[in-house]
Image (spheres, rainbow, N blue to C red):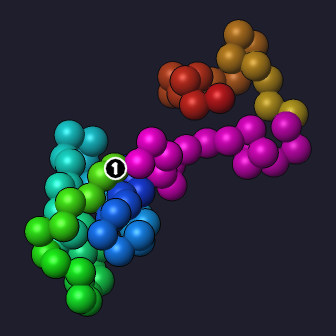
Amino acid sequence: MPTYDYQCDTNGRVVEVKHGMSEVLATWAELCERAGIEAGDTPADSPVKKLATGGQIVKSSSRGSGNMPPCGGGGCGGGMCGLN
């Protein structure tokens, strides 16, 4: 299951959660429930927005030595070329 980062503008917090690709969280209460954290003093209906980046983004710096073959060389097992 992919992870996503959500930001609450009311309290400035960014929280990482796991959920299905078609699901979108809209409020601080939904985000807290999914993340298993306390809402604290932030109003439950405060809006949250999904950020463009999340925990499942693969960066070239995280590929170890960088000696992986390019996609054209058969280095993309499972059709994951879009993550390079």
Q: Main secondary structure of the magenta part?
A: loop
Residue 9, compared with residue 40, is above or below; it is above
- Front in this rendered view, residue 41 or 72: 41
For the point 20% across and 60% down, which residue is it? 47
Q: At which x and y percent is residue 41?
A: 24, 88
Viewer can see residue 46? yes
- Establish if 13 lies above or below 55: below
Q: Which residues are magenta?
A: 51-66
Evaluate whether residue 1 shows in this view.
Answer: no
From the viewer's side, name the closer residue of 33 and 14: 14
Q: Which residue is mark 1?
A: 50
Q: Residue furthest top?
A: 72
Q: Amino acid at mark 1?
A: Lys
Q: Quadrant of the C terminus?
A: top right
In the displayed structure, 43 sits above or below 1; it is below
In the structure shown, which secondary structural element does the residue marked by tag 1 occupy?
strand
Q: Check residue 64 for magenta coloring.
A: yes
Is residue 22 rendered to the left or right of residue 8?
A: left
Q: Quadrant of residue 71?
A: top right
